[in-house]
Image (cartoon, grey):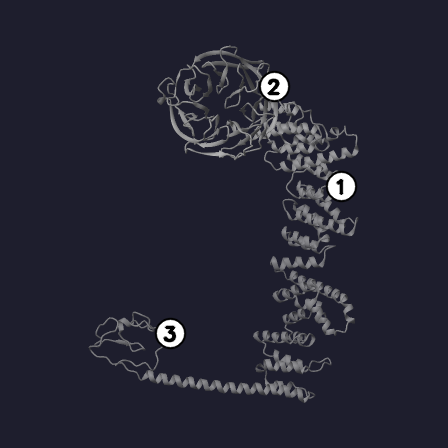
Amino acid sequence: MSMRTAFDLWPALDHRSKSSKISSVAVSEDGRILYLGLSDGQIEEHSIVCNQHGVRTSLRARKHIGKKPVQDICHLHSAHRLALVCDGQLLLLDQESLEGHSIPNIKAVSAMAVSPWAQYPPRIAVAMRANKRNARVMVYEVLVGADAGSPFGSSALCVSQANVVESLTIKSMAWLGQKVVLCTSLRYMLLQPTQGTSTQLFALAEDAPSPTLVQSIPSANLAVLLMDEVGVVINDSGQPAQSALTFPSTPIALAASGLYILAACTDGVHVYDRTSASWVQSLPYPPGVTPSPGQSIITAYNNKGSCVLFSGLQKVMLFQPIALDEQAKDLLRAGQYEQAINLANVCAADGAPWAETAFAQAALMLLHELRFEEAMRILPQCSLSLFQPMELFPLFPSITAPWADQLPRKGYWGLHRPLQPLDALLAGQTQPQTRTLLEQEAMQSIAEYLLGVRDREGVDAADGIDTLLVYLLAELDDDSRLTSFAEGPQKVTPDVVAGLLQRKGQSDTLAQLYASAGQPAAGLALWKEIADENQGAEGEKLQRQQSAVQRATKVLLNRHAAPTAVMLTYLPWLISASPKHALSVLKTREVDDETGLKLVRGEGASTDLLWRYLDYLVCQQGSSQAALHTELALTLADVALQLLLRSQSSGADMEASPASSQGHQAAVKQVGDPALQEVQGRLRSFLKQSSRYDARLVLARIRGSPLWQEQVVLHSKVGDDTAALRILAIEIEDMVEAERYCAEQGLKGGQATHALLLDMLLHPGQGRPPMFAQACHLLAAQGADLDPLQVLGALSEEMPLSAGVDILSHLLCERLHRHRQGSIIRSLHKACSLSASVDRAELLSRRAVTSEERACAMCHTRIGSKIFAVYPDGTLVCYRCYKKSEPNVCLVTGRDFHISPAKSSEKWPD
């Protein structure tokens, strides 16, 4: 049974003559003229008329050519000629008058091939015997416009000839691009006529089938090499181009027509798809045409493939190709969807306009057969100008009803019923499990298709498509893709899918859709509801709340997505839910200071948010209001105290350890709470940098707390150096900071800070013992800045002798060092003074002697009684030249005496 009807077979001609048989056949390029070569040396010209009822031929002309059969005949369309082989000779005839001549010096022609492509001028390849060991192939160009009856030289030209080492006769050949394929009884060869070279195709084993014939496929620039029941398709390089064709028996003849290869076998004509090597159709011979054993069948076809002729000795059959789109329709009607799609794919590659219609028609028919995945794989091959995704809306009327009036009315080829709702299509499925699986497959496949085409340019009803996509993804419980889709650019109408998403627990996604659709208030209300709910497991609930807060923040940050009024409505909720995100909104949206402060001071706002927002206003926005500076300092101090209290309570367990209290404090200081370190660092930095806050008010807030460094800064601000030094030296025993503080105050003009520190170390008070070691260290480092008498006066009468020795030894060593240093400096100054006196005396003793003959070293003018100048190196110049340059630079030598002063040892020339 045929897969499809690719050709109609019509009896074309019955040559009823007892004196002659048909020996060759040709057809014109337009398929309207049939040429017959007869066994009695005549040729006949018949007109062909085809209609829906059959084929009718009529004899137009007859011409006697020779006494022997016409072996081959070809039509040269572009040259309006016929090429014939008769009695071993090549003849050229005019297609109108059938007048012509033979080509001289050509004998024993065994095969002929005409170039199938539209070439100017057309070429003929002729094979003949050159000698017993060689065959010769000659290529002629037929000159267009030359008179066929004129001498040969003016109508055709031999452009190349090549000898082929071949003892057997070349029995068939065909053009393959610019090359020629030759066939003998033992081998196939590929000849390059212009170069005269040939190569053997395939190394055949001894028991391999012998070559039979070669057939070109002009439309694809391929050729079929026949070996028994196998046809090998090769390209112009001689390499196999696709799967081989397998015939039921050895073909007697081959013909090519478009996508198809026709093989005439003993049982009929078989049609194959050359692109897939698959069998398509079989046509039995009509009565009286079946070849007897050993009888040949002759084929002829035009390059377009619109007319294919098979001829026996008496009858000619015409194979009329069915239009490819009609073949596709027949395949679809028969339910052969795969074959129809393959045919459409091949034709689409060649630019056939009907191929997209075939894709759409096949997809719609597959939908009715519940083959959803196959249908959705086909639809992307349709352009949007032919098939719009919204044509699938009838499958889901409950969701796509708002766009029902926009549906296009297209019938395509009219092979399918109008698309019904998915429930109606599945109504015939009685098994619930099967119905559920098919419904899932339909939704999944349609969702994949819509996701792939929704971004194409020219999509209609994009909002309806995106809304349907949300419905499908939600029904499929594909939460990850649904969330990703909602976050990206889309045009969903949220109200249509709101109920479904809430039932599916996708309120977060619904809120995102509302926000994207320009309804931020509805989206923010949903996110607030999600963040405030207390249902579900703790981990899942926290994750949902964090997601809601993050998405709401993203919307509030965008001034285009959330107007100011909406932002101010939901900002108090965000402040209580996530101060960190609220602060980013306050900064980005540039809320005015008064409104922002009112929000961060309101109920539910944290002190952490307050100090960070105040820090933003003061330090980043540059506010100069003293009240804000003071409030920032007080808020930072309060937060630091709270964190200290929390840190001390969390470290209560450590007090039971053997470590000392001092070691515990050091550990807390080093390890500490990161939040506490941040706040303390910010507070300390702000207290140092700002001068607009009320230092006494802040000091009163933190006095007596462990915020020692901050108190030092504040005491310094109010000018209480004693309190600052007492904290550094006595309370926290940080001598490095204490000495640095003294040094800073000394630079500011405070000269008594070191003495004050020393007195504090020796008399700490509050029942504390004197800190002699620290005092000695201070004397060793800063002794030069302390008055010895003042130090002695500060020593206590109860001080141990050992401690006094240390202090006094430091003082004596320092004083002795200063005395010796002074002596050395004084001696150095004396030496320098004496050296300068000697140099001055040497310079004063110098003299310059001149005469009337002495000339200026620069302009060589005699000095005579003129004013002159002498440089420190003794160079003498006239005063006029001396004034032309700097006094310290010699014009003659270029020496700069500021850089290289003259030495007293340098003698002036006399």
Does label 1 or label 3 sit earlier along the sequence?
A: 1
**Is residue 696 at all visible to an observer of this figure?**
yes
Identify the residue under disc 2.
284
Can you say whether 230 is above or below 829 in the image?
above
Mark 3 element type = loop
Nearest the viewer among 424 and 886 is: 424
Side of 324 relative to 526 (left or right): left
Residue depicted at 55% across the width and 17% down the height: 318
Identify the residue under disc 1.
504
Side of 287 relative to 434 (left or right): left
Does label 3 or label 2 sit earlier along the sequence?
A: 2
Nearest the viewer among 173 and 321 is: 173
In front: mark 2 or mark 1?
Answer: 2
Q: CA distance from mark 3 to mark 2?
A: 119 Å
Q: Amino acid at mark 2?
A: Pro
**Is residue 385 at all visible to an observer of this figure?**
no
Please state the total of marks drawn on the protein image: 3
